[in-house]
Structures are given as C-alpha cells and as structure tokens.
Image: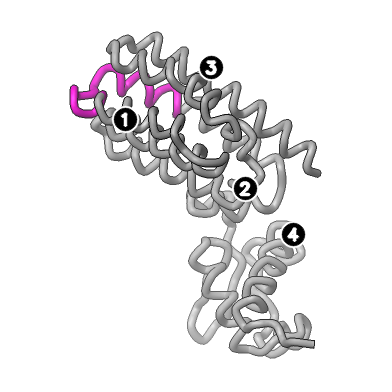
C-alpha cells in the first residue's frame, strides 16, 4: 500500500474540520481543543493540523490567537464573500442562494454595461462571444462564457462589479465540473448568450437587463437540474 502524499492528508483534514465547523460540532466562538488532542483525534501529525488551520484561517472559519488558542469565528456575522467556496461545498442550499445573487447582479451588470460600454468594449464582447461558439468541449465553452461575463463587468466602468463577478465565479469554481451542462453544445451556449451582448451593443439598458435575466435563469435551471440528477 502506498502512503498518501502529505498534501492529500492536509486536504482531507481541511475538509473534515470545515464540515465539523459548519455542522456545529465546533460551536462558533468556542476554542478548539489543544492541538495535541485534535491531532490524535483526527489521526494526523501536528504539522498537518497546523497546515489545515492555516487554510481555514485564510477562509475565514478560524482565528488563531498566539498564546491563547484557535477559535471558531462567527462566520455568519463576521465572514465575507471569500467563504462562499467553502459554503458551496458544504451544501446545495448555498448553491441556490449563490445562483439567486448571480441572477440579480448579472442582470444589473448587463444593464450598466449597456449604458457605459465603449466601442472597443463592445468589439471585445462580440469577439469573446464568438470564442464561446468556437470553444472545444463543454469545459472550454464554459470558460469562454465566463470571460464574456468578466468583460460585461469591466464594461460597466465600476471595478466593484468586476470584483463581485470574480467572487461569484470563485464560489462556483468548486462545482464547475458538475455545472457544465449548459455549455456542452457550444452553438447553443453562444445563441443563449448572444441576446445579452447584442442588447449591450445596442445600448438598450432595459433589453440588456431582461436578456441577462433570461440567460441566467435558463442556465441556472439547467445547472441545478444537473446537480440534482447527480446526487
């Protein structure tokens, strides 16, 4: 039997600790047991435990106080969007809530892009839309589609929309392979997205909002149906 690589053990421990925190096994605001006790309980070295702690601190689930210990953060009150990837991995309800925000923000971004896009940005959007149709495989079309949405966010002229778009895509990343269904037919994916780009190009804010809402609703339905079938 071949020993697991150390990084794989850290990955597994990070996931186990994350689930124990989100399931309430370790209560918010409470300090975790001493490292020696935890490492023995999970059957890992203290070095592995420290690496997992570092990741969960970075994710916003834990905070470490030198000389005091490691405490579970009240992530619902203090956490930020950087927690979304961990929460999506935790349960399907988070996926639905992320999709709801994706729909609202995406429609708003499209309407603002219609109001603000430059000629150069419209040209870029059309080129990126063509790249969706020309992509090889569902994963390729999916990634090309992402770039269209990043370009829409840039076209608003508001950098916060760009960061929000990045945040939502980072949240979606852990499940990306399971959400490829709307992109397996590149021609259909391109046709589905084209009304959004054309409404922005026409500088029609209302049409862009409606087209984005229709696009995001349709792709959300396909993705959630596929997720449900996979469970």
Which of the two discs, 2 and 4, labels the residue nearer the N terminus? 4
Q: Residues within 10 Å of mark 1 (few under 14, many from 20)?
A: few
Q: What residue does disc 2 label? A: 177
Label pair 3/1, CB-CB below 8 angstroms: no
Q: What residue does disc 3 label? A: 214
Residue depicted at 69% across the width and 69% down the height: 17
Q: Is residue 54 left or right of residue 14?
A: left
Q: CA distance from mark 1 to mark 4?
A: 48 Å
Q: CA distance from mark 3 to mark 4?
A: 38 Å
Q: Quadrant of the N terminus?
A: bottom right
Which of the two discs, 3 and 1, labels the residue nearer the N terminus? 1
Residue depicted at 30% across the width and 23% down the height: 113
In the image, residue 108 lies in the stretch drawn in magenta? yes
Which of the two discs, 3 and 4, labels the residue nearer the N terminus? 4
Label pair 2/1, CB-CB below 8 angstroms: no
In the figure, 16 relative to 171: above or below?
below
Which label was assigned to residue 127? 1
Range covered by the magenta-colored residues: 106-122
Q: Residues within 10 Å of mark 2 (few under 14, many from 20)?
A: few
- Of badges 3 and 1, nearer the viewer stands 1
**Secondary structure that dominates the magenta span:** helix
In the image, residue 130 lies in the stretch drawn in magenta? no
In the figure, 189 relative to 39: above or below?
above
* Residue 51 x, y percent position in the rendering: 56, 79
Which label was assigned to residue 78? none
Q: CA distance from mark 2 to mark 4?
A: 28 Å
């Amino acid at each position: 039997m071949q020993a697991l690589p150390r990084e794989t053990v850290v990955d597994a421990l990070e996931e186990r600790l994350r689930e124990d925190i989100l399931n309430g096994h370790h209560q918010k605001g409470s300090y975790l047991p001493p490292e020696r006790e935890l490492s023995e309980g999970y059957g890992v070295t203290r070095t592995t435990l420290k690496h997992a702690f570092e990741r969960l601190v970075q994710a916003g689930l834990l905070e470490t106080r030198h000389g005091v210990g490691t405490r579970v953060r009240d992530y619902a009150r203090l956490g930020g969007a950087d927690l979304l990837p961990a929460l999506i991995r935790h349960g399907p309800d988070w996926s639905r809530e992320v999709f709801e925000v994706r729909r609202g923000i995406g429609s708003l971004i499209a309407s603002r892009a219609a109001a603000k896009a430059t000629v150069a940005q419209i040209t870029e959007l059309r080129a990126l839309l063509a790249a969706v149709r020309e992509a090889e495989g569902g994963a390729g079309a999916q990634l090309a589609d992402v770039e269209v949405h990043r370009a829409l966010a840039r076209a608003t002229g508001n950098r916060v929309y760009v960061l929000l778009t990045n945040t939502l895509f980072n949240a979606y990343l852990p499940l990306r392979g399971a959400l490829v269904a709307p992109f397996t037919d590149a021609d259909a994916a391109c046709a589905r997205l084209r009304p959004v780009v054309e409404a922005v190009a026409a500088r029609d804010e209302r049409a862009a909002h409606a087209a984005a809402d229709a696009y995001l609703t349709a792709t959300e339905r396909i993705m959630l149906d596929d997720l449900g079938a996979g469970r």
